[in-house]
C-alpha cells in the first residue's frame, strides 16, 4: 500500500518529480548538493506546498504539516530547545500527547549518559542524535530525515543506522536525504536526483 505519493511535483529546483513509497522501508534520496533532496524532504514533511503537482501522505495532502505521529522531520537545522535537557527534547512530541517517554531511544542512540544535560551544552553530533531520537519517538508513519549521519564518527553512524532500521521494523517509512554511502548501502530503495529530476529508482 502506498503511503507517500508525489505526483508531477515542481518546486524551486524540483522538476516534474513523481514517486510512490510504501511503509516499512528505508528510502534514500541521493544526489549532489542542489539536486533537490532537502526540498523534497520539506514537501513530504508538509513544511511547504509544491508550486505544481501534489504530495500526499496516507491519502491526505502533506501540506499543511501533519501531526508528528504521522510525519516527523529531522531538518538540517535541528531546532532543538537549548535550555531543555536532551531527554526533554527527545520526549517533547510524546509529552505533548501524554505518551510514554523516550528511554529506549536514548539508550539506542548513545544518549543515556547525557540525558539530563541541556541540549545546548552538547556536541553537534550529540545534538544530531537528539533530534533523530525526537523524530522517531512517536514511531511515526513517516520519518523524514535530512542528513542524519552528519557530525557522527563511525561508531555513532552505526547507532544511527541501527535506529533507522529498528524504526523500519516498527513499520515506519524512513526517508533519508544523504550523501553518505553507508546509508545508501543499507537502503531498501534509492532515489537518485539530478538537477531536480528523478534520474533513477532502485
Image (cartoon, grey):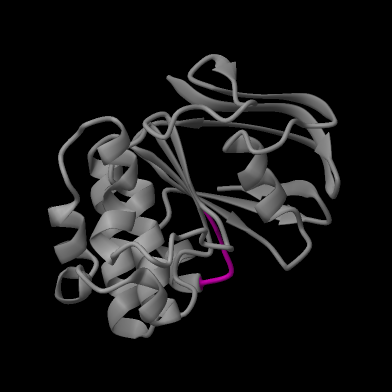
Q: Is residue 46 above or below residue 119?
A: above
Question: Residue 32 appears at what percent x and percent y?
Answer: 72, 67
Q: Nearer the viewer, residue 109 or 200?
A: 109
Q: Quadrant of the N terminus?
A: top left
The answer to whether 168 appears left or right of 51 in the picture is: left
Give residue 143's position: percent from left, percent from top.
43, 43
Q: How many marks?
A: 0
Residue nearest the viewer, comparing 95 with 125: 95
Q: Main secondary structure of the magenta part?
A: strand
The answer to whether residue 110 is visible is no
Residue at 46% over, 64% down: 148
Is 107 within the magenta?
no
Q: Is residue 167 left or right of residue 189?
A: left
Establish if 102 lies above or below 56. Answer: below
Task: Indicate the quadrant where residue 23 lies.
Answer: top left
Q: Residue at x 34, y 41 (%)?
A: 93
From the top left corner, tell me how far across and down residue 111 is, in percent. Answer: 22, 70
Asked if one can make out residue 121 in the rendered structure from this viewpoint, the answer is: yes
Residue farthest to the top, as pictured: 59
Q: Is residue 163 left or right of residue 173?
A: left
Residue 96 vertical position relative to residue 116 in the rendered view, above or below: above
Query: Relative to residue 99, is residue 191 depicted above or below?
Result: below
Residue drawn at x 74%, y 53% is 36
Q: Which residues are magenta?
A: 176-180
**Nearest the eye: 47 or 162:** 47
Position of residue 68 measured from the top left corner of the image (x, y, whole percent): 42, 35
Could you say which is closer to the camera, residue 87 or residue 105?
87
Amino acid at each position: 500500500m502506498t503511503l507517500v505519493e508525489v505526483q508531477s511535483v515542481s518546486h524551486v529546483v524540483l522538476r516534474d518529480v513523481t514517486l510512490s513509497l510504501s511503509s516499512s522501508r528505508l528510502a534514500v534520496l541521493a544526489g549532489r548538493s542542489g539536486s533537490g533532496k532537502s526540498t523534497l524532504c520539506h514537501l513530504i514533511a508538509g513544511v511547504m506546498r509544491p508550486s505544481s503537482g501534489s504530495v500526499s501522505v496516507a491519502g491526505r495532502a502533506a501540506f499543511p504539516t501533519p501531526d508528528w505521529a504521522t510525519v516527523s522531520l529531522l531538518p538540517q537545522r535541528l531546532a532543538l530547545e537549548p535550555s531543555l535537557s536532551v531527554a526533554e527534547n527527545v520526549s517533547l512530541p510524546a509529552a505533548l500527547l501524554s505518551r510514554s517517554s523516550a528511554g529506549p531511544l536514548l539508550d539506542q542512540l548513545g544518549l543515556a549518559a547525557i540525558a539530563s544535560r541541556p541540549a545546548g551544552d552538547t556536541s553537534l553530533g550529540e545534538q544530531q542524535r537528539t533530534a533523530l531520537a525526537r523524530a522517531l519517538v512517536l514511531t511515526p508513519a513517516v520519518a523524514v530525515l535530512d542528513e542524519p549521519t552528519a557530525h557522527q564518527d563511525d561508531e555513532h553512524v552505526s547507532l544511527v543506522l541501527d535506529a533507522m532500521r529498528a524504526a523500519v521494523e516498527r513499520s515506519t517509512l524512513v526517508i533519508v536525504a544523504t550523501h553518505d554511502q553507508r546509508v545508501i548501502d543499507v537502503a531498501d530503495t534509492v532515489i537518485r536526483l539530478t538537477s531536480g529530476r528523478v534520474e533513477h529508482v532502485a
